Amino acid sequence: MKRRSDTLQELSEDFLFHLETQNYSPETIKAYRNDFKLLSRFLTDEGIAEIGEITASIMRNYGKWLKRTGHVATGIARRIHSVSSFFKWMEEDEIIKDNPMHKVKSPKRDKPIPIYFRDDELARLLCAPRLDHPLDQAIMTLIANTGLRRQEVINLQLHDVDINANLLKVRKGKGGKDRLIPLNKQAKQALAHYLTVRPVVEYSAFFIAMRHKRLPIGSAYLHRLFHDCLDQAGITRKGLTLHKLRHTFATRLLERGADLRTLQELLGHQDLSTTQIYAHASKERLSRAVNLLDETM
């Protein structure tokens, strides 16, 4: 067992390294690191320097402190979850004997209905002039038709895509699990066209930037690509991000008859309750359509 005098910074860095070995995305690890910085600020204010001094009472006060400092319920719940995961890891690794988070309840939070692209917006987005380039067309078409996460697109390798079998394999997605995703006609055609112009390089990454340095694409490339397309399509509605294409993929499938279990497998969700939120989005859209009848009476 490690000393109970180990600092929060030392142990949190050990935990973040553990998450890296479990194939958590850089964005998730960054979020955890920011959560630990916030916790460290609170503990410093409380005069606590060692992990062994943290009690359930102190952690309940942490939740109250987050609320007083302007954090909303969803943000508080996420940060409490981060700390709970950290303490669970320390308990399982026998770094601590007593886990104070066992006696701390996370605040209830209403899951917001996902924002997604309307059909007309999606059509305009996928016709943006920048998508005349086969690489960019392949990336945006793939995300819209498979619901891949940003990091899953970046991590995609040449051997993960089987054009002839119409299949794509996501290796060690969120939670470290593999999954297979069928390719529809649009995605297959876009990927096949890109492969005819993909540069021959030493990298095995599927997507290689072609305009300047011929290197695997990264998060910054996807960010620029999405916002260029958004601007060129004239879409100004707030809340639409690259990740919302994943929400759009899920909502469109449900509206076309896909069941939740199938959607759960395609999205790589560990918990069905995470997938059910898209059912609410679909129902709300149908409800709005029916309510249009009231305007004609």
Image (tube, helix red, strand yellow):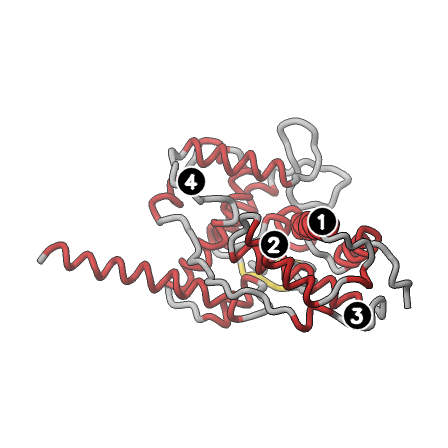
Which labelled disc corresponds to residue 45? 1
Mark 4 vs mark 1, CA separation in Å: 48 Å
Measure the C-alpha gap from mark 1 to mark 3: 25 Å
Q: Earlier in the sequence, mark 4 or mark 1?
A: 1
In front: mark 4 or mark 1?
1
Q: Which residue is mark 2?
A: 65
Q: Is residue 76 left or right of residue 34?
A: left
Disc 3 target residue: 91
On screen, 118 above or below 100?
Answer: above
The image shows residue 240 at horizontal and vertical percentages of: 45, 44
Sequence-earlier tag: 3 or 4: 3
> Who is closer to the viewer here, 28 or 206?
28
Residue 167's x, y, as percent? 58, 59
Numbered circle sitting on residue 125: 4
N-terminal of the pair, mark 1 or mark 3, is 1
Picture coordinates of residue 239 (x, y %)?
Answer: 44, 44
Mark 4 neighbour class, 10 Å CA radius: few under 14, some 14 to 19, many 20 or more: many
Tell me the mark number nearer the camera, choosing from 3 and 2.
Answer: 2
Q: CA distance from mark 2 to mark 1?
A: 11 Å
Q: CB atoms at circles 2 and 1 under 8 Å apart?
A: yes
Q: Secondary structure at mark 2?
A: helix
Report the amino acid beneath label 1.
Asp
Whether residues under marks 2 and 4 lie with C-beta atoms below 8 angstroms apart, the answer is no
Residue 160 numbered mark, or none: none
Q: Is residue 63 above or below residue 138?
A: below
Whole-angstrom CA distance, mark 3 to mark 4, is 48 Å
